[in-house]
Image: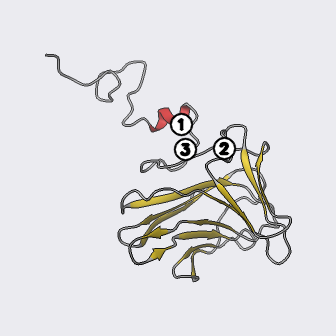
Amino acid sequence: MPHGTPDWGHTGPKETTYGLDDLGEHAVRLGSPHLWDRRGDVVFETDFDEGLGDTESYLGGAGDAVILHTRYARKGAFCVKLTAASAGGGKATLATYLPFPVFSRLGLEVTFGCWPTTDYIELHAAVRNATTTWYPSLRWDPNVGTLQIRTGAVAWHTVAAAQLAFVTPSCCNTFKVVFDTASGNYVRVIANDQ
């Protein structure tokens, strides 16, 4: 019976190719939108090539909108344009609901652009157990550059006073927040290169 590693393994002798420790690089080269921070396993991802069918949108008032957009996409033909234009603090939200896997570390990652008139960009999760709900969240204010995490029901804590993110409609910023649902603690926040 033959022994050894498979042809696609990374320990065999190679001359013109390089074996991969995992298939993350291969996936990105084939077009995966998940390319920024590849730690962990992907539970859900979209580049909106299939439309908005696996998401829900919530609007604050007249003038607010969530639409498929063919300009400024980082990958593929589409991105989503959120417009919060209603009077009194407009709101445009895109949401995806997933069955909860296991109590472990989970992350939210988004690539986005924004106009200078944007008040803030937020990433939210809702983690429910039998008795409580935890809302791990990340907020970036493009006007002053603060990056915050939610530390209470409505309380925000500044983790970085001045982030070097780009205020432009082009999708050139990638932010990620990772949280541990078992311990109820934040693990890391990544904002572009920081």
Amino acid on which the number 3 mark rests in the picture = Leu
Residue 162 appears in which quarter of the rendering?
bottom right
Q: Residue furthest top?
A: 1
Image quarter of the C terminus? bottom right
> Residue 190 placed where, x, y %?
54, 60
Q: Which residue is mark 1?
A: 28
How far apart are labels 3 and 1 at the CA level? Answer: 6 Å
Q: Inspect the image, locate mark 1, and give the three-letter code of the amino acid beneath it.
A: Val
- What's the residue type where badge 2 is placed? Phe
Q: Residues within 10 Å of mark 2 (few under 14, many from 20)?
A: many
First of labels 3, 1 by sequence position? 1
Which marked residue is nearer to the observer: mark 3 or mark 2? Answer: 2
Dots 3 and 1: beta carbons under 8 Å?
A: yes
The N terminus - image quarter: top left
Asked if the residue under mark 1 is in contact with the one under mark 2, i.e. CB atoms within 8 Å, the reply is: no
Res. 35 mark: 3
The Cα atoms of the two marked residues, 2 and 1, are separated by 16 Å
- Seen in the picture, residue 65 relative to 54 is either above or below; the reply is below
Q: Earlier in the sequence, mark 3 or mark 2?
A: 3
